[in-house]
Amino acid sequence: MSTNPRSGENKQHTPDIASEARLLEIRQQAETRGVVPARGIRPVGAPFPQASPENGYFGIHLLKEPQWTLEIPLYFFAGGAAGSAAVIAAMADWLDKDPGLAHSARWVAFGGAIASSALLIRDLGRPSRFINMLRVFKVQSPMSMGAWTLAAFGGAAAASVFAKSAERRFGDRFPIAVIGNLGQFLSALFGLPFHNYTGVLIGATAIPVWNKNIATLPIHFGMSGLQAGVSLLEVMGHSRSRALNLLGIGSALWETWEGIHLESRNEPELNPLKRGASGWITRVGGTMSGPLPLALRLLAAGSGARRSRTLRRWAAMCGIAGSLLTRYGWVQAGHSSARDWRLPLEIPAELPATDNLQMKPKLSQRETAA
Amino acid sequence: MSTGLAVPPQQHRITAFLTDSTLCIGCKACEVACKEWNGVSADGFDWSGLSYDNTGTLGHSTWRHVKFVEHGPEPGIGGNAGEQLTWEFSSDVCKHCEVAGCLEACPTGSIVRTEFGGVYVQPDVCNGCGYCVVACPFGVVQKNPEDGRAFKCTFCYDRQKAGLPPACAKACPTESIKFGEINELKVAAQERVRELKARGMSDATLYDPTETSVKGLHAMFIVRGDPRQYNLPPKPEVPTVYLREGWRASAIGSGLLVAGALLAFLTSPGRKRGRRSERR
């Protein structure tokens, strides 16, 4: 990921060999003959860029691109899946429905918490200082809230998974049962903000495409996380659970609505979600976590047992890929959004950028004189 | 043991920069002085082709940056002849916002408000999470990929502690960069704009967005013409203004998940314990 905003600007302004050679020719002609009959050169980079209310400051973007590594969208995915899985585990256990599913979901929650921590620490510029994240408790910083939530969630998920596994083996004796139930309750409690706070995290920034969608991003990311959690559990073998299919249908429905909601709005801030590489990633991701798994799951609900299982496995694969792509798409969209120099300066795109010095008449006069 | 000596409530004055583009000659002495004093690394020798500005933006290795606002002729402005370019210079710097996005966002408490009112990144605390980078509405703070931590103008905290003006203000040969007590400077800025207008520079304005959520700057700018051509946003917002809506959405999403899970498990057939799971 390029961190130098200038690197893109430079290329078009470096002189090329042809024009340099022609310049040399002109100089030699002027020296020997005193006059140069043929035309001069058009300087590379011309017409000269201008700073103006239409061009901003030479079109150099004001905002900085995110400097997060590729671990961060993967963390959004893992965290979303883990948080949702903890809630699924608790519900399945409390309503006494599916102990096997609850067991797997606890492991997904725990594994997701471990993966999340590892990914977050890897992304840091100074990984050895990761503990500084817990140096202050800062309500106005979603990153701080997220770090604390992850810490609490990870602890609760670990307690839950180990105590409940021990319970399966040794029975629900006194300390084990208490630790297990408390851990399960807390992991579900912290899993709720953990599964969707990443939407707040990127929404409460200066990046236009993110903050423009602050009202829906947390729910969108939460649903994407639920989709991922459900799909992971199905791939792990719970592809007959009716509850999981219902949750899958619910999240796919929401993601479909989210896609329609984004596509139907015509705001310049949303362009990165529709154009270029980031547009492709978000659209493919949206299709794979919205309409596609929705159709497959509905088909599965109306099919025979065997076909239903296959269809749901496909829906699950789709959902996992879709959720991953959605996260990468949104982060990528943040990059293009930061590069859009017009947005923070409130310069409408319809305004044609003036790319010419108004000195043409003079130049042509000189040309005709020569 | 009380000594009975009253400690003055405010031992340090709150300081600010006032950068006056009408006095700037584009010498870049401030950029050099800043790098020299703070030991900031070089940032390459690229020719941008954008007027005389080969620096481009503020960043982890650029804490002062002279902008060269060059555009087509505007007869009458600044006494320019008809075919002369309009060429303004303005030295950019971290705005040290009254309500700073980077400071609010920093999860480690590395970014603090100093006793002089500046916004300071403590290099011994920063762990390089990069959240301040996307939280700054002016695109100032940046992570140094080689070092791993975020850097920006320190408002010469060390010099101010010793009672000295920041290096850039000290080096400025035309007093385009003024440094002083913030309220005095705000008055001086108004007076200067009035004076410029009286002298025929009707487009002179003070850039200090006090009416937005950043609530004003500790680095104000006097510029000529539209501030947007200096890459100064008309409505910079501190990202914390989005928090309320964001957390509300998060709460709604959590409610949806609980309701959905309840509904899904309540309606699914309550089989005997473990039958399905034992098979898988």
Image: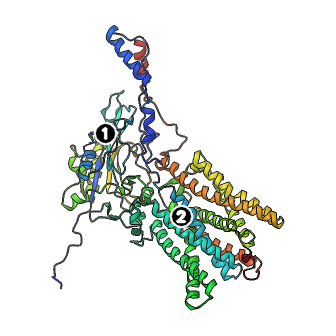
Residue identified by numbered label 1: B200
- What residue is drawn where x is 43% and y is 45%? A5
Report if the CB atoms under discs 2 and 1 are less than 8 Å apart: no
Q: Residue furthest top?
A: A33
Question: In 3D space, how far apart are the residues under numbered discs 2 and 1 (Cα atoms)?
Answer: 52 Å
Q: Is A64 left or right of B165, judged from the image as shown?
A: right
Q: Quadrant of the C terminus of chain B?
A: bottom right
Q: Which residue is mark 2?
A: A198
How many marks can you see? 2
Q: Chain of mark 1?
A: B
Q: Chain of mark 2?
A: A
State the residue in front, B263 or B207.
Answer: B263
Q: Nearer the viewer, residue A237 or B107?
A: A237
- Whole-percent x, y for residue A253 in the image: 70, 62
Residue drawn at (24%, 43%) of the image: B29
The one nearer the camera, A153 or B249, is A153
Q: At 38% from the left edge and 53% from the top edge, which residue is drawn?
A: B144
Amino acid beneath label 1:
Gly
